[in-house]
């Protein structure tokens, strides 16, 4: 979890997933759905997802 140095209202959750399929499966879990259903009440705006490709080798 990170917070923007210039805007303390901006939070960033950085995660690494083995594959997009693994992330998609995570989003289908009941506990994830419960949390994400609460996001409109918890967040000031819609969640933004950014997908990146890791350039360093995996351990």
Image (tube, rainbow, N blue to C red):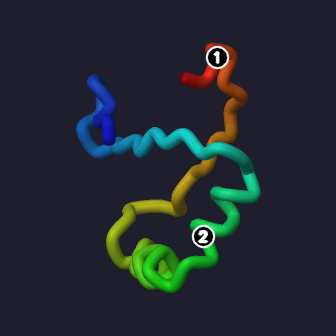
In the visual, does 22 lie left or right of 59? right
Q: Position of residue 40 (x, y in %)?
A: 44, 75
Nearest to the observer: residue 23 or residue 40: 23
The spot of residue 39 in percent (x, y) is 43, 72
Q: Residue furthest right?
A: 21
**Looking at the image, is 3 positioned above or below residue 56?**
below
Which of marks 1 and 2 precedes in the sequence?
A: 2
Front position among marks 2 and 1:
1
Residue identifier under label 1: 57
Q: Secondary structure at mark 2?
A: helix
In percent of width and height, residue 5 lies at 27, 24
- Can residue 56 be seen here? The reply is yes
Q: Nearer the viewer, residue 24 or 45?
A: 24
- Verify CB contact (< 8 Å) between mark 2 and mark 1: no
Which quarter of the picture shows residue 35?
A: bottom left
Q: Which residue is mark 2?
A: 27
Quarter of the image with the C terminus in it: top right
Q: Residue at x 71, y 28 (%)?
A: 53
Location of residue 48 in the rendering, given as x and y in whole percent from the top left corner: 57, 51
């Amino acid at each position: 979890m990170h917070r923007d140095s210039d805007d303390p209202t901006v939070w960033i959750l950085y995660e690494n997933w083995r594959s997009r399929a693994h992330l998609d499966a995570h989003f289908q879990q009941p506990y994830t759905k419960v949390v994400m259903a609460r996001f409109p009440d918890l967040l000031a705006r819609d969640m933004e997802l950014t997908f990146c490709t890791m350039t360093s080798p995996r351990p």
